Image (cartoon, rainbow, N blue to C red):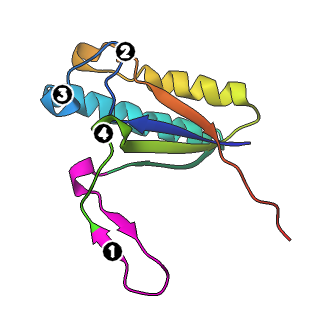
């Protein structure tokens, strides 16, 4: 079963200070935690992909009718909290295992090394039947 564990730009349960305002050593510890989690999941054969994404102000909105050139704009944007900040795609044996991984990711360190309680959305990746 594949699941996407989604990080957004919402505040965390135990930390309302935006990451860019953290001390450099706290940012480094947070990023090291994310890399270690990815390595752990890869070693267990559970990691499909994981990426952090650029800030929302670098996002583009594209729409097209399939006949003419696409329209590319830098907005309108949803609320900042609705923007995807990063994700993991994991291939696990159960929904419960996906929740365990999300809980581990949620406890990433913040300022002073305290777990931030980040809200991680867990969604199963659906697939269409092949003909």
Q: Secondary structure at mark 1?
A: strand
First along the sequence among labels 1 and 2:
2
Which segment is the magenta one?
Answer: 54-72
User: Where's residue 102, x and y in %?
Assistant: 54, 27
First along the sequence among labels 3 and 2:
2
According to the picture, the residue beneath numbered tag 1 turns out to be 71
Image mark count: 4
Can you tell which of label 3 and label 2 is closer to the viewer? 2
Q: Quadrant of residue 98?
A: top right
First along the sequence among labels 2 and 4:
2
- In the rendered image, residue 109 lying in the magenta stretch gets the answer no
Is disc 3 in contact with disc 4, using a CB cutoff of under 8 Å?
no
* Left or right relative to 2: residue 65: left
According to the picture, the residue beneath numbered tag 3 turns out to be 25
How crowded pointer 4 is (Cα within 10 Å; few <14, some 14-19, many 20+) is rated as few
User: Where's residue 126, x and y in %?
Assistant: 70, 49
According to the picture, the residue beneath numbered tag 4 turns out to be 79
What is the spatial separation of the Cα atoms under label 1 and label 3, in whole angstroms? 41 Å
Task: Say which mark, if any, is on residue 122.
Answer: none
Q: Secondary structure at mark 2?
A: loop
């Amino acid at each position: 079963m594949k699941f996407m564990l989604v990080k957004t730009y919402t505040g965390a349960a135990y930390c309302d200070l935006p990451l860019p305002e953290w001390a450099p050593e706290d940012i480094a510890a947070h990023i090291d935690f994310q890399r270690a989690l990815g390595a752990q999941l890869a070693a267990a054969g559970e990691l499909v992909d994981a990426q952090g994404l650029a800030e929302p102000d670098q996002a583009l909105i594209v729409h097209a009718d399939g006949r003419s050139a696409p329209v590319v704009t830098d907005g309108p944007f949803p609320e900042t909290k609705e923007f995807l900040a990063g994700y993991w795609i994991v291939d696990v044996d159960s929904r419960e295992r996906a929740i365990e991984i999300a809980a581990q990711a949620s406890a990433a360190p913040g300022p002073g090394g305290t777990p931030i309680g980040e809200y991680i959305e867990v969604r199963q990746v659906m697939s269409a039947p092949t003909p």
